[in-house]
Amino acid sequence: MHLDFSFSYYIGLAGITVFAISGAVAALEHKEHHHDVFSVFFTGFITAIGGGTLRDITLGNYPVSWVKDENILWAIFFGFLLVIFFPRLLTKLRNELFLFDTLGIGIYTVLGTRIALEHGVNFFASALLGMISAIFGGVIRDTLMNEVPFIFRKEIYATACLAGSTVYLSLYQHGYDGNYNLVLSASVVVLIRIVAVKYNLGLPKIKIF
Protein backbone atom coordinates (compact mmCIF):
# COMPACT_ATOMS: atom_id res chain seq x y z
CA MET A 1 0.00 0.00 0.00
CA HIS A 2 1.36 3.41 -1.00
CA LEU A 3 0.62 6.45 1.14
CA ASP A 4 1.31 10.02 0.07
CA PHE A 5 3.21 11.61 2.96
CA SER A 6 2.76 15.16 1.68
CA PHE A 7 1.85 18.44 3.33
CA SER A 8 -1.85 17.85 2.66
CA TYR A 9 -1.58 14.36 4.16
CA TYR A 10 -0.27 15.70 7.47
CA ILE A 11 -2.82 18.51 7.44
CA GLY A 12 -5.47 15.83 7.02
CA LEU A 13 -4.15 13.96 10.06
CA ALA A 14 -4.26 17.22 12.01
CA GLY A 15 -7.90 17.61 11.00
CA ILE A 16 -8.59 14.07 12.21
CA THR A 17 -7.00 14.89 15.56
CA VAL A 18 -8.92 18.13 16.16
CA PHE A 19 -12.23 16.48 15.25
CA ALA A 20 -11.44 13.60 17.62
CA ILE A 21 -10.76 16.16 20.37
CA SER A 22 -14.03 17.94 19.53
CA GLY A 23 -16.06 14.76 19.89
CA ALA A 24 -14.28 13.50 22.99
CA VAL A 25 -14.61 16.84 24.80
CA ALA A 26 -18.30 17.05 23.87
CA ALA A 27 -18.85 13.64 25.48
CA LEU A 28 -16.70 14.48 28.49
CA GLU A 29 -18.55 17.68 29.37
CA HIS A 30 -22.07 16.45 28.69
CA LYS A 31 -24.04 16.89 31.90
CA GLU A 32 -26.97 14.56 31.25
CA HIS A 33 -25.00 11.35 30.77
CA HIS A 34 -22.20 9.55 32.55
CA HIS A 35 -19.37 8.89 30.11
CA ASP A 36 -16.67 6.33 30.75
CA VAL A 37 -13.35 6.09 28.92
CA PHE A 38 -14.75 4.01 26.07
CA SER A 39 -17.75 6.25 25.36
CA VAL A 40 -15.50 9.34 25.31
CA PHE A 41 -13.15 7.61 22.86
CA PHE A 42 -16.01 6.34 20.71
CA THR A 43 -17.60 9.78 20.42
CA GLY A 44 -14.26 11.25 19.37
CA PHE A 45 -13.72 8.39 16.91
CA ILE A 46 -17.10 8.70 15.22
CA THR A 47 -16.77 12.48 15.02
CA ALA A 48 -13.38 12.15 13.33
CA ILE A 49 -14.28 9.50 10.75
CA GLY A 50 -17.97 10.18 10.11
CA GLY A 51 -17.71 12.72 7.30
CA GLY A 52 -14.76 11.09 5.55
CA THR A 53 -16.43 7.68 5.66
CA LEU A 54 -19.62 8.99 4.04
CA ARG A 55 -17.52 10.75 1.39
CA ASP A 56 -15.54 7.59 0.62
CA ILE A 57 -18.70 5.47 0.39
CA THR A 58 -20.27 8.01 -1.96
CA LEU A 59 -17.17 7.99 -4.16
CA GLY A 60 -16.84 4.18 -4.06
CA ASN A 61 -13.40 4.62 -2.49
CA TYR A 62 -12.85 1.26 -0.76
CA PRO A 63 -11.57 0.41 1.70
CA VAL A 64 -12.52 3.68 3.37
CA SER A 65 -9.65 5.90 4.47
CA TRP A 66 -9.45 4.97 8.16
CA VAL A 67 -9.44 1.25 7.30
CA LYS A 68 -6.75 1.73 4.67
CA ASP A 69 -4.44 4.02 6.67
CA GLU A 70 -3.67 3.14 10.28
CA ASN A 71 -2.14 6.58 10.86
CA ILE A 72 -5.68 7.95 10.93
CA LEU A 73 -6.45 5.70 13.89
CA TRP A 74 -3.26 6.82 15.63
CA ALA A 75 -4.26 10.46 15.05
CA ILE A 76 -7.64 9.78 16.67
CA PHE A 77 -5.99 8.01 19.59
CA PHE A 78 -3.57 10.93 20.03
CA GLY A 79 -6.49 13.36 20.20
CA PHE A 80 -8.19 11.13 22.75
CA LEU A 81 -5.06 11.06 24.93
CA LEU A 82 -4.84 14.84 24.86
CA VAL A 83 -8.39 15.03 26.17
CA ILE A 84 -7.64 12.51 28.92
CA PHE A 85 -4.52 14.36 30.10
CA PHE A 86 -5.65 17.98 29.53
CA PRO A 87 -9.46 17.93 29.90
CA ARG A 88 -9.88 21.37 31.47
CA LEU A 89 -7.67 23.19 28.97
CA LEU A 90 -9.27 21.56 25.93
CA THR A 91 -12.79 22.08 27.25
CA LYS A 92 -12.01 25.78 27.74
CA LEU A 93 -10.58 26.10 24.22
CA ARG A 94 -13.60 24.34 22.71
CA ASN A 95 -16.18 26.39 24.57
CA GLU A 96 -14.56 29.83 24.44
CA LEU A 97 -12.91 29.70 21.04
CA PHE A 98 -14.93 26.89 19.35
CA LEU A 99 -11.41 26.02 18.20
CA PHE A 100 -11.58 22.35 17.25
CA ASP A 101 -14.86 22.44 15.32
CA THR A 102 -13.68 25.45 13.35
CA LEU A 103 -10.27 24.07 12.42
CA GLY A 104 -11.75 20.67 11.68
CA ILE A 105 -14.35 21.86 9.21
CA GLY A 106 -11.84 24.13 7.49
CA ILE A 107 -9.40 21.30 6.88
CA TYR A 108 -12.00 18.66 6.05
CA THR A 109 -13.84 20.91 3.59
CA VAL A 110 -10.81 21.49 1.41
CA LEU A 111 -9.40 17.97 1.58
CA GLY A 112 -12.83 16.49 0.91
CA THR A 113 -13.19 18.70 -2.15
CA ARG A 114 -9.71 17.76 -3.38
CA ILE A 115 -10.34 14.03 -2.93
CA ALA A 116 -13.62 14.30 -4.83
CA LEU A 117 -11.83 16.04 -7.72
CA GLU A 118 -9.20 13.29 -7.76
CA HIS A 119 -12.03 10.80 -8.33
CA GLY A 120 -13.24 12.69 -11.40
CA VAL A 121 -16.29 14.28 -9.77
CA ASN A 122 -17.72 17.50 -11.23
CA PHE A 123 -17.13 20.80 -9.45
CA PHE A 124 -20.62 21.12 -7.97
CA ALA A 125 -20.59 17.61 -6.51
CA SER A 126 -17.02 18.13 -5.28
CA ALA A 127 -18.11 21.20 -3.30
CA LEU A 128 -21.00 19.27 -1.75
CA LEU A 129 -18.76 16.33 -0.85
CA GLY A 130 -16.27 18.73 0.72
CA MET A 131 -19.08 20.12 2.85
CA ILE A 132 -20.33 16.64 3.78
CA SER A 133 -16.82 15.59 4.77
CA ALA A 134 -16.65 18.57 7.11
CA ILE A 135 -20.05 18.51 8.80
CA PHE A 136 -21.27 14.93 8.96
CA GLY A 137 -19.04 13.80 11.82
CA GLY A 138 -20.31 16.74 13.86
CA VAL A 139 -23.91 15.84 13.00
CA ILE A 140 -23.36 12.33 14.37
CA ARG A 141 -21.64 13.74 17.48
CA ASP A 142 -24.46 16.15 18.25
CA THR A 143 -27.07 13.46 17.64
CA LEU A 144 -25.31 11.12 20.07
CA MET A 145 -25.25 13.95 22.62
CA ASN A 146 -28.98 14.58 22.05
CA GLU A 147 -28.25 18.12 20.87
CA VAL A 148 -29.38 20.09 17.83
CA PRO A 149 -26.66 19.72 15.14
CA PHE A 150 -24.80 22.88 14.14
CA ILE A 151 -26.33 22.83 10.65
CA PHE A 152 -29.76 23.46 12.20
CA ARG A 153 -28.63 26.35 14.39
CA LYS A 154 -28.65 30.01 13.48
CA GLU A 155 -24.95 30.68 12.89
CA ILE A 156 -23.51 30.13 9.43
CA TYR A 157 -21.89 26.68 9.36
CA ALA A 158 -22.41 24.54 6.26
CA THR A 159 -22.46 27.70 4.13
CA ALA A 160 -18.94 28.50 5.33
CA CYS A 161 -17.84 25.10 4.05
CA LEU A 162 -19.42 25.72 0.67
CA ALA A 163 -17.66 29.09 0.48
CA GLY A 164 -14.30 27.45 1.21
CA SER A 165 -14.97 24.78 -1.42
CA THR A 166 -15.88 27.46 -3.95
CA VAL A 167 -12.64 29.34 -3.31
CA TYR A 168 -10.64 26.13 -3.67
CA LEU A 169 -12.38 25.16 -6.91
CA SER A 170 -12.01 28.66 -8.36
CA LEU A 171 -8.27 28.70 -7.73
CA TYR A 172 -7.99 25.08 -8.92
CA GLN A 173 -9.65 26.01 -12.20
CA HIS A 174 -7.01 28.71 -12.68
CA GLY A 175 -4.14 26.31 -12.10
CA TYR A 176 -3.59 26.73 -8.35
CA ASP A 177 -3.69 23.25 -6.86
CA GLY A 178 -0.87 23.43 -4.36
CA ASN A 179 -0.53 23.95 -0.63
CA TYR A 180 -1.23 27.67 -1.04
CA ASN A 181 -4.72 26.91 -2.29
CA LEU A 182 -5.33 24.41 0.50
CA VAL A 183 -4.33 26.79 3.29
CA LEU A 184 -6.11 29.82 1.81
CA SER A 185 -9.38 27.98 1.19
CA ALA A 186 -9.39 26.37 4.64
CA SER A 187 -8.71 29.81 6.14
CA VAL A 188 -11.78 31.18 4.38
CA VAL A 189 -13.95 28.60 6.15
CA VAL A 190 -12.35 29.39 9.52
CA LEU A 191 -12.69 33.16 9.04
CA ILE A 192 -16.36 32.97 8.03
CA ARG A 193 -17.15 30.81 11.07
CA ILE A 194 -15.34 33.19 13.43
CA VAL A 195 -17.18 36.22 12.05
CA ALA A 196 -20.53 34.39 12.04
CA VAL A 197 -20.21 33.35 15.68
CA LYS A 198 -18.81 36.67 16.88
CA TYR A 199 -21.58 38.72 15.27
CA ASN A 200 -24.32 36.07 15.53
CA LEU A 201 -24.81 35.97 11.77
CA GLY A 202 -27.13 33.56 10.02
CA LEU A 203 -28.93 33.03 6.74
CA PRO A 204 -32.46 34.42 6.27
CA LYS A 205 -35.20 32.18 7.60
CA ILE A 206 -37.85 30.69 5.34
CA LYS A 207 -41.30 31.75 6.49
CA ILE A 208 -44.28 29.47 6.06
CA PHE A 209 -47.43 31.37 5.25
Image (cartoon, rainbow, N blue to C red):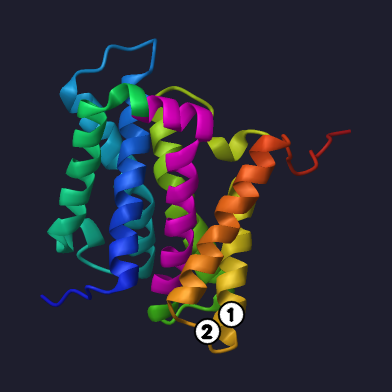
Q: Quadrant of residue 80?
A: top left
> Residue 193 placed where, x, y %?
61, 46
**Circle number at residue 171:** 1
Residue bearing the label numbered 2: 176
Q: Is the residue under label 1 in contact with that under label 2 (CB below 8 Å)?
A: yes
* Residue extending furthest toward the left: 1
Q: Is residue 197 above or below residue 87?
A: below
Quarter of the image that includes the C terminus: top right
Q: Is residue 160 above or below residue 38?
A: below
The prevailing secondary structure element of the residues shown in magenta is helix
141 vs 83, left or right, is right
What's the amino acid at mark 1?
A: Leu
Q: Is any part of residue 60 visible from this angle?
A: no
186 vs 37, left or right, is right
What's the amino acid at mark 2?
A: Tyr
| Magenta residues (range) | 90-116
Q: Is any part of residue 24 visible from this angle?
A: yes
Residue shown at 43% from the left, 31% from the top: 93
Residue shown at 44% from the left, 47% from the top: 136
Magenta span contains residue 107: yes
Q: Is residue 84 above or below residue 77?
A: above
Provide the secondary structure element on which disc 2 rests.
Answer: loop
Quarter of the image that includes the N terminus: bottom left
Graded by Cα atoms within 10 Å as few (under 14), some (14 to 19) or many (20 or more), the crowding at tag 2 reads some
Q: Nearer the viewer, residue 101 or 133?
A: 101
Tell me the CA gap for discs 2 and 1: 5 Å
